[in-house]
Amino acid sequence: MLRSIILVGDSTSHGGKVLTGDGDLDVSGKKAARVGDAVSCPKCGGNQTIVEGTPGIVGSNGQTYALEGMKTSCGATLIASQSLFQA
């Protein structure tokens, strides 16, 4: 099943937002997020990182891209804002 790529500005289940992404992959004017990119987390306090990515699709830093439903370091679930670009 295909899932949407996560972009900078997308939300998490803890009420946070994706803060950083890959400057080499732009989707509708937003950078795609990868493992290791930062997310804010108001529930846990401070910033966390994306810890899950799709195998086989590697970003410019050698990390895999995050998809909808994948997790952050505090256990939050990533929520995609778009459905046009999927993997």
Image: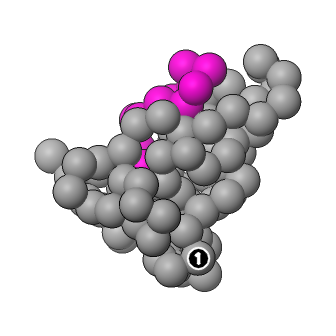
Q: Is residue 46 above or below residue 79?
A: above
Q: What segment is highlighted magenta in the picture?
A: 65-77
Seen at 77% across and 18% down, the residue is 44
Seen at 77% across and 35% down, the residue is 47
- Amino acid type assigned to the residue bearing label 1 in the image: Gly
Seen at 48% across and 64% down, the residue is 61
Label the magenta part by its dominant secondary structure: loop
Please say whether residue 47 is visible from this viewpoint. yes
Task: Please provide percent x and percent y for residue 48.
Answer: 69, 33
Instruction: Specify whether 39 is left or right of 47.
Output: left
Q: Quadrant of residue 23?
A: bottom right
Task: Please provide percent x and percent y for residue 66.
Answer: 42, 49
Coloration mode:
one colour
User: Pointer 1: residues within 10 angstroms few (<14), some, or many (20+)?
Assistant: few
Q: Which residue is mark 1?
A: 23
Task: Please provide percent x and percent y for residue 51.
Answer: 48, 34
Q: Is residue 52 above or below residue 22?
A: above
Seen at 55% across and 31% down, the residue is 72
Q: Residue reaching furthest front?
A: 62
- In the rendered image, the quadrant that contains the C terminus is bottom left
Q: Does the stretch in magenta take in 84?
A: no
Q: Does the stretch in magenta take in 67?
A: yes
